[in-house]
Amino acid sequence: MSQIIATGKVAEFVVFIASAIAGIYYLWSAMKGKTQALRPMPQVDAISEGVDKAVEEGKPVYASPGDQAYLSGMYAPMTITGMNVLRYTAKLAIQKGARVIFPVPVNAESLPLIDGIFREVCVAAGKPEAYRREDVIYYGTEYSLHAMGLTATLAREGVSCYVEVGAITGGGSSTPAGWAREFGGLVVGGTARYLHQGTWAMLADYPMFMDDIFSAGAICSGDDVVKASLVGGDVVKLALVAITVLFAILAAAGLPALSWIKA
Amino acid sequence: MSRRLYQRQVPVFLVSVLTTIIVMEYFVVRYPPLTAVKDELLLWGAITYSFVMLFGYTMLVLSHARQVMERKRGRSVYLSGIKLGALGAFLLLGLLSPGGADGSQYRTLYAYIVGYAGAGMYSAWVHHPYNVYRFFRLTSIQSTIMFLTWLFLVFRELSVIVAVYPPLYDIGTWIEAVPNAAAQRAALAAAGVGTLILGVRAIVGKEPGLIEMEVT
């Protein structure tokens, strides 16, 4: 195998293949009609509560895929899953009659996607008049401008619910998220960036940590096939935990376990 | 030809093929022709992404132009007017000033207008720790552990504290190097698997996040 796979990448390759097989198996079995029961996520349920709160208070809901929602590189998967949550939030808000404001990330290329989702959701809900161009707001390419611009919007328009899930920085998001909570908004947010787990643990009423955002994206899609694929990921994670414990025991016993992983 | 075919199936097929080539190149032993294909594909990816960015900025300008043309004169109309005006002014500066967008005039004006305004706004980051201190509550085992972790790392960074009681430096370093590193690896592994599963869904056309949009 080492003649085909580059040295040092065998373990990575095995995890990659195992994840792909597990994911495809559960997708395939769901397409055949065998769905998987998933426990509800309080963070996703909280979005619905937040939208109800917005309807009662007459203040807007904010939905964002993160201030750094790039469509390429390591942030792209976070952006994709963030768009699922954004769509879900927008759909609930439009159906229930709440106003939604979409803070556009610092990268303007995500604007057409957000604008398109907004239009699509309004039309699908039978309320095309709910689309308001001025509620898709771009603050500029600097994180500081995004942070201050969005904070100004929160102060001016008020906030009942603030949902930000996806590719997030500290500079662009932490200040507005903190102010959203200060102004009485229910904050639901999270990212898969390790550095910012503490930020959301502090600032969100309902934080999502690391791969929670991918689970939330799948659940928000409402598609049983998409949701079933999460189970494949869980199988791989359990296997990784078991392998980690096994290799720790082997290494403690004096065997060169680390060199096997690096093969 | 249905919209589903050219908006969904053809792009998903192309992405699947291109992704397979790039993934293969990453895992297999070095094979120069495959590396050359991958480099060419990444170059085309960068070119395509430039058009995506151009599309995004065009949409932005069009959106503000439509806003300005609204009959109802609200705050957003004036804000859009200012944005378009600033865009036009910097565009003219970039085109007409000596050296263009790389010239000293353009760069000086940008630095003293946008840069300084941005620097002032960065001062608002003080709200990050402010909000954290305001909202933190010692109400659970997890939050207590988080607090203790923070406390010992702060002790390590304060030389006065370390001078009074030197072992605090080692305690902070141990927290960072052992429990934190373990938690970080577990968290990154979990997020990595989640990313892989999402990627697999996208490749087989079962990820609705972006590509399902406007396909009817």
Image: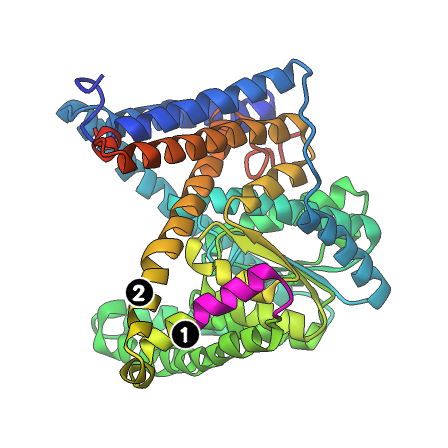
A218 within the magenta span: no
Left or right relative to B93: residue A39 = right
| Total tally of numbered discs in the picture | 2
Q: Nearer the viewer, residue A47 or A15?
A: A15
Label 2: chain letter: B
Helix, strand or loop: magenta stretch: helix
x and y percent of residue A67 in the render? 50, 59
Quarter that holds the C terminus of chain B:
top right
Find residue B142 and report its image quarter: bottom right
Residue B22 appears in the picture as rendered: no
x and y percent of residue B89 in the render? 41, 74
* Mark drawn on residue B89: 1
User: What residue sits right under mark 2 in the picture?
Assistant: B173
Find residue A242 and report its image quarter: top left
Q: Nearer the viewer, residue A32 or B82?
A: A32
Coloring scheme used? rainbow
x and y percent of residue B112 in the render? 34, 83
* Residue span colored magenta: B138-151
Decide: is A38 above or below A32: below
Q: Are marks 1 and 2 on the same chain?
A: yes
Left or right relative to A239: residue B26 = left
Name the residue type under label 2: Thr
